[in-house]
Amino acid sequence: MVNVWIPIQSLGSVNVAVFRKDSGEVDIVDAGMYSARSIHDLIAKVKNKIRGRIEGVGKIVITHFHVDHMSGAAILKEVFEPTVFIGVGELDTPLRSGSPDMFVENILSLYREHGVPEAVIESIRRTHPVFRTILAYRAFSSLDLRPIYPGDILKLGEAEYRALPAPGHTPGHIVLESLDGTHAIVGDTLLERITPSVILYDESHDPLGHYLKTLEMLAQKNYLVAYPGHGNPIISPAERARELVEHHRKRLEEVLSLLRRKGSMTGYEVASSMKWRTSYSNWAEYPPVEKFFAIGEALAHLKRLQVEMKVEVIERDGVKKFRIL
């Protein structure tokens, strides 16, 4: 594993798995960002790790369609001409099928229906990173991407991995499981110290429901270690998966408790009332992008409760509110 710089202050870096072939060529999982500094850092660290020059990059496997994990592949494609693979579920993601700025605009329209004030929406629009990384998304989307199907066996270097669907953080996220079952490359499905974001981007989807199933699948595995997209390797990943399931169960109960006290609330009111793990003392201090993710997370939990038939949606004057059934 090499830790590659990315220009995202809250994360700082992304992990890239490197597999060396006997020929000196390498395969990699995830590719850093569409940035000269990021790719320079990646190449320098790979050369140091393999103690020699890179004879070529044969395959790039992308765990999920987020800019910090996939967009560097567009630069590496120009230099090394690798074959680029991504989970089949990501090929149809709304983020890829249209302009990424329109994807976020559609989410903001959804947020507006759930009571988010126009001033908050405008502040998010001004600061959301997708508007600064449109070229990166478009560069990656223009590549000849090869789909990975559930159960596919991928040879990486001299090793082989099985692709497992792991939706939630994104619709087509994949996990790569070693064939001997000892370890897995898990992207952003498991992180050591933070909880991966799961946001509602479309009313027809239940992202938290999908993510809980992914976590339950990982909790049944006996991996000794999991290699995440950010941070340190995770020892006892099954235990971490169970911790995250419990975290979201408590979040769901927190939302229900708010609705019991208040009677009915918009998604925005729920988000601004929840207790988030943060250094900010109140909701007004949250930067716009953090509000974007908090609102999306709150709506994902409300959607799960709606699917579980614990809450219902009522609409008044074009704004949706939730109340307990």
Image (tube, rainbow, N blue to C red):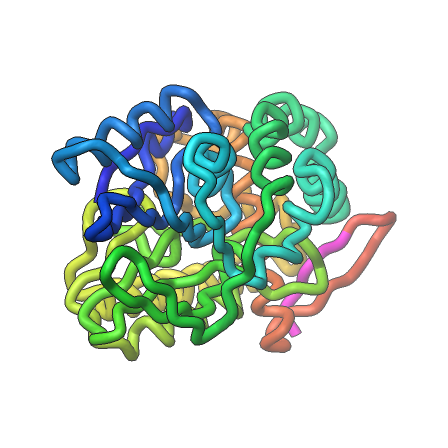
Q: Height in image: 11 above or below 24?
A: above
Image location of residue 239, percent across then percent down: 22, 68
Image location of residue 249, percent across then percent down: 41, 67
Look at 87% across and 48% down and name the residue there.
317
Whether residue 322 is in magenta: the answer is yes
Whether residue 139 is in magenta: the answer is no
Look at 31% across and 58% down and name the residue there.
156
Q: Quadrant of the N terminus?
A: top left
Q: Height in image: 253 above or below 20?
A: below
Residue at the limit of the structure toward the front, as seen here: 23
For the residue pair 9 and 325, the one nearer the viewer reads as 9
Image location of residue 86, percent across then percent down: 50, 55
For the residue pair 149 and 297, the one nearer the viewer reads as 149
Residue 295, quarter of picture: top right
Image location of residue 78, percent across then percent down: 49, 32
Q: Specify whether 249 is left or right of 198.
A: left
Q: Quadrant of the C terminus?
A: bottom right
Q: Height in image: 249 above or below 94?
A: below
> Does residue 230 appear anywhere in the picture?
yes
What's drawn in magenta, residue-wise?
A: 320-325
